Amino acid sequence: MTQVWTQAERKALLEAARRQIGQLARSSPMPRLPLGCAEIDDCLKGGLTAGALHEVAAADHRASPAAWGFLLALARVAVSARGGTIVWPLGKRAGDFGVPYGPGLKAFGIEPSDILFIRCRTREDALWTMEEALRIGGIGAVAGARTPRMDLTASRRLQLAAEASATPIFLLRTYKDDAASAAATRWRVHPHKAARDGFGFFSAPRWHVALERVRGGRTGEWVVEWNHDALCLRIPAGLRSGALPASGARSAA
């Protein structure tokens, strides 16, 4: 015989379920994804939160390619620790600086076969794709760009979906985008003069990054570079002393 629940009983069951979920969440801390730079990982309390939304903002329009590069570096570090495919929703039209390029991805240790690109017709399709990819789980990360007019509610949905599956999502924020967001971290990226080898040839990309927002951690500012051989981020030895508190940055509770 089917049991019929009253409205009050349904409410009580839901409240009990919420309390149980909250207790489980508190007893099982979210995994961390160390970046390999002790100074930065210390500010992040051990590394990036695995199940969270992380935003990378370009300092200005010209810094957008640099911001994309740093976002790829973060995604590669995450996938190195987790394994799995990167799901990358693409808009109907290419951005001002084009679409991801195979040889460029390989410079970060990412094979084209490691990424699932999904062409989306509308911003709603792109948001739906990101959220569903996170909720399905079993992937390495979600990467892409914030959709036009993305609001706080949309970012909260992505954050909750990331938490539920312990899967990171990395989104590029344009320099004009000042909308509120539920992101756990926000990085502001400026391009920096690249490292050169003994023959004067380009050897490693470098970025000037400011950790402007971090939930439960400390903000900071560094020059970092991508190590092609070890496939990780590092702070150049000669610039290690340049790590300074980011001016105007703030921690997020």
Image: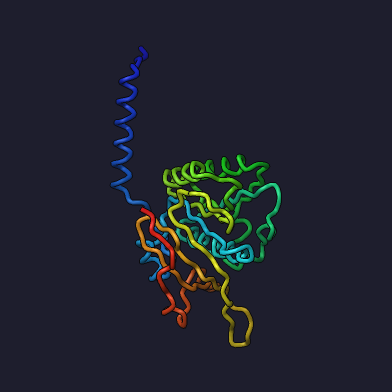
In this rendering, is residue 119 above or below 217?
A: above
Q: Residue furthest bottom?
A: 198
* Residue at the (69%, 47%) spot, across then down: 92
Is residue 157 shown left or right of residue 199? left
Report the residue at 50% width, 52% height from top.
Answer: 169
Above or below 143: residue 34: below
Is residue 77 or residue 65 the one in the foreground?
Answer: 65
Image-quadrant location for residue 35:
bottom left
> What colour scheme does the image use?
rainbow
In the rendering, at what x and y percent does residue 117 appear? 63, 50
Residue drawn at x 60%, y 63% is 60
Is residue 109 visible from the viewing direction of this image?
no
Q: Indicate the quadrant where residue 204 lies.
A: bottom right
What is the x, y in percent for residue 99? 68, 57
Q: Position of residue 20 (x, y in %)?
A: 30, 36
Along the line of sight, the residue nearer the viewer: 196 or 122: 122
Which x, y percent locates residue 198? 59, 87
- Residue 18 visible? The answer is yes
Q: Compare residues 57 and 167 and report the one nearer the observer.
A: 57
Left-right relation of 248 to 228? left
